[in-house]
Amino acid sequence: MAQKRVVILGAGFAGLQLARNIKDSGYDITIIDQYNFHQFQPLFYQVATARLEPSSISFPLRKIFQGKKNVHVRVAKGINVDIANNLVETDECNFQYDYLIVATGCTTNFFGNKNLERYAYPMKSTTEAITLRNRILLNFEDALHCSPDDYEGIMNIVVAGGGPTGVEMAGSLAEMKKYVLPRDYPDMDFSKLQIHLVEGGPATLGAMSKASQRKSQEFLERMGVKVWTNTLVEDYDGRVITLKDGKTIRTSNLIWAAGVTGNLPTGIPKETVVRGNRIKVDEYNRVEGHPNIFALGDIAYMETKEWPKGHPQLANVAINQAKHMAKNMKHMLKGGELKKFTYKNPGTMATIGKRKAVVDLPAFSFQGFFAWLFWMFLHLMLILSVKNKLIIFINWAISYFTNDTTLRLILLPTRKQIDLAKQHHQLIDN
């Protein structure tokens, strides 16, 4: 009997977790992603602020599935789903499936503003985090020889979005300003460096408890970050941010962490797509009306009694959905009955800086030093390999005791690298 063909779109938390859990169950598995590595998104901001190397939080997919002849990794973009023919079309080639798992996650939402898309710096991939790191480091090289008219814009860094990503990024930049930059550039006055956090809602970390919201803003302001709440970015031309209320901020550096939207493949029926570009699924993660298509993680929208507005777009949800889906897929091989997915929120957390974090658990919340230790421990546990856990722990330990890192390398692409990328895409197109 031929193996059932499973195509998994996306190698994020959900897609990778599912593949790892069914790799020995008799399925023929194809994983399709635009990168040949898994990315640990919660630590992108540490790559962007030169605290960790990209290789510390990125894991080659082929390494994970070495020796598994039934697991095929394919690097491809331009994904289209031909539901009528059970076919996934990509810019590389086409893939037939018996079961399709859409786990493509989210991408940055610029809310249709082309200027923001052109000039702001997002942080939804390792490559974008490296680009942002280069921008931040080049910013201070520019400050050494810029004109007086450009100096204010260079010395203003604005982070848009007061969720965990924005808060963590702003806190990391504040620590960089205090501990690192004055030693790297002793001839510069960093009292003029201003870090702004702009949040459209009434508080930072809007999805967390009131205590965590208050404490996170208190931590940030104590670190010198100017927090703008109830403030929306209207436009940005690369030099000046225009706010909704008409105020402006001069800056050459806008970091965009203000929203996400589902990374939706073409071909998904429009009637199954809901707000946020998410795919509506039932409690078995099946796409409604399509019994052999499933969606997991950030891209999936599942209404339940406990979660009438869908589950939060968190790594923990994606991982648990994937584990549950793996059990159901093993039952499917044997003709067994599927079980509904249930999710109990274990809590949420965010770190603001050294010895500063906030944690909300189901029964209580706590902030400060122990919350920071809790945050570090859980994030280390989520890292895939022991080697990477050790590397990250060593980097964190060095940073803790020295308030410094040695990772501030400006690595810009060469002409050959750009040509290589073009050649690769031309080969795929042909």
Image (tube, rainbow, N blue to C red):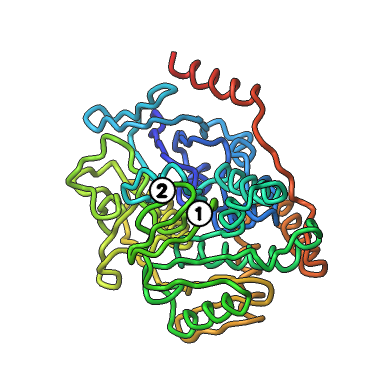
Q: Please identify the residue farthest to the front as the structure is shown.
A: 148
Instruction: For label 2, count other residues whose C-alpha is less than 10 Å away and answer few (under 14), some (14-19) or many (20+).
Output: many
Q: Position of residue 430 (x, y in %)?
A: 44, 13
Q: Secondary structure at mark 2?
A: helix
Residue 96 tag number = none
Above or below for 233 versus 264:
below
Q: Position of residue 152 (x, y in %)?
A: 58, 58
**192 vs 3, nearest the viewer:** 192
Above or below for 101 versus 148:
above
**361 vs 430, nearest the viewer:** 430
Above or below for 260 versus 125:
below
Question: Is 90 positioned to the left or the right of 418 in the image?
Answer: left
Q: Quadrant of residue 320?
A: bottom left
Q: Are marks 1 and 2 in contact (CB under 8 Å)?
A: yes
Above or below for 115 versus 400:
above
Q: Would you say residue 333 is visible in this rendering?
A: no
Instruction: For label 1, count other residues whose C-alpha is less than 10 Å away and answer few (under 14), some (14-19) or many (20+).
Output: many
Q: Position of residue 149 (x, y in %)?
A: 58, 52
Quarter of the picture containing the N terminus is top left
Residue type beneath disc 2: Leu
Residue 116 tag number = 2
Q: Position of residue 181 (x, y in %)?
A: 74, 60
Q: Quadrant of residue 202?
A: bottom left
Q: Secondary structure at mark 1?
A: strand
Q: Could you tell me how far apart the alpha carbons at marks 1 and 2 are, in whole angstroms?
A: 9 Å
Residue type beneath disc 1: Leu
Label 1 vs 2, first from the N-terminus: 2
How many numbered circles are shown?
A: 2
Residue at the image position 51 percent from the left and 46 percent from the top: 16
The residue wearing badge 1 is 254
Residue at the image position 65 percent from the left and 69 percent from the top: 377
Question: Is 196 positioned to the left or the right of 175 in the image?
Answer: left
